[in-house]
Image: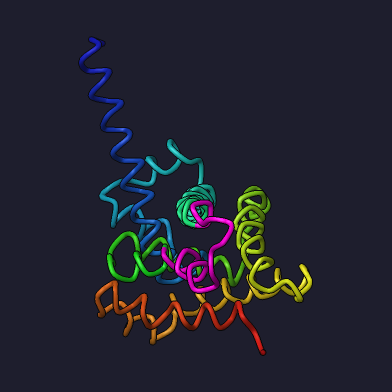
Amino acid sequence: MSPEKTDLRREAGRRTRDDLLAAALELLAQRGQEGVTLREITQNAGANVAAVSYHFGSLKALCEATIEHALERYLDAQIRELDALGGAATLSELAEAFARPMVSALAAGGRDLAVIRLVARVGIEPPEGWERLAGKFELARRQAVRVLAVNLPDVDRHELDFRVRCAAGMLNWLALAPVGAELAAEPADRIERMLVPVVAGAFRGAR
């Protein structure tokens, strides 16, 4: 086989793999892992069952790869935002950074929103292999707690960590709840104005 034909086959294989991941993402975001079938994914991707076996090995492996990619994309975005905060960042600035991936996804819709909704689903019902990304989850929490500790020096680290987990859970719920769909109809600046004070309040706690 000529090099040109080999390259074309590789490119076609990459496209098929990407199409399968995209189709799985949309369906998983809508229904969760128990609600998708191999037939639906291949039909939406314009591929056949053999392509799933070739690229992933099984439906389960395809779903796991899709979930892992979505989680990594979300966590990497959140870690970048939190890492950019200075040592004197306020609770409001922390809330903005923490919620920005969600705000951006709600405003953008499409694939970005599907990623966030999938992250929310697996955040509520963690899948097998969740521990592979434990380091990134821990890093995001540690970055948030670092800023919280400066703003709330009288609150112990365990409680600060709890507040971060609660704020993350609230964002997960929002991605799937009807009010999230209402927010998605708004421009990004209005979504941020409405959402950031709520996240900041979760961080601040009772006074």
Along the horizontal axis of the image, is 185 left or right of 126? left
Question: Which residue is at 75% across, 75% downward?
Answer: 155
Q: Which residues are magenta?
A: 82-100
Question: Which residue is at 29% across, 72% downward?
Answer: 188
Image location (x, y in percent) of residue 94? 52, 67
The quarter holding residue 167 reads bottom right
Q: How is the image coloured?
A: rainbow
| 107 or 112, nearer to the observer | 107
| 206 or 26, nearer to the observer | 206
Question: Which residue is at 57% across, 71% downward?
Answer: 168
Image location (x, y in percent) of residue 164? 63, 70
Question: Which residue is at 61% across, 69% downward?
Answer: 125
Kindly give the residue lying farthest to the bottom in the view shown: 207
Q: Is residue 182 above or below residue 45?
A: below
Image location (x, y in percent) of residue 40? 35, 60
Kindly give the residue lying farthest to the front in the view shown: 88
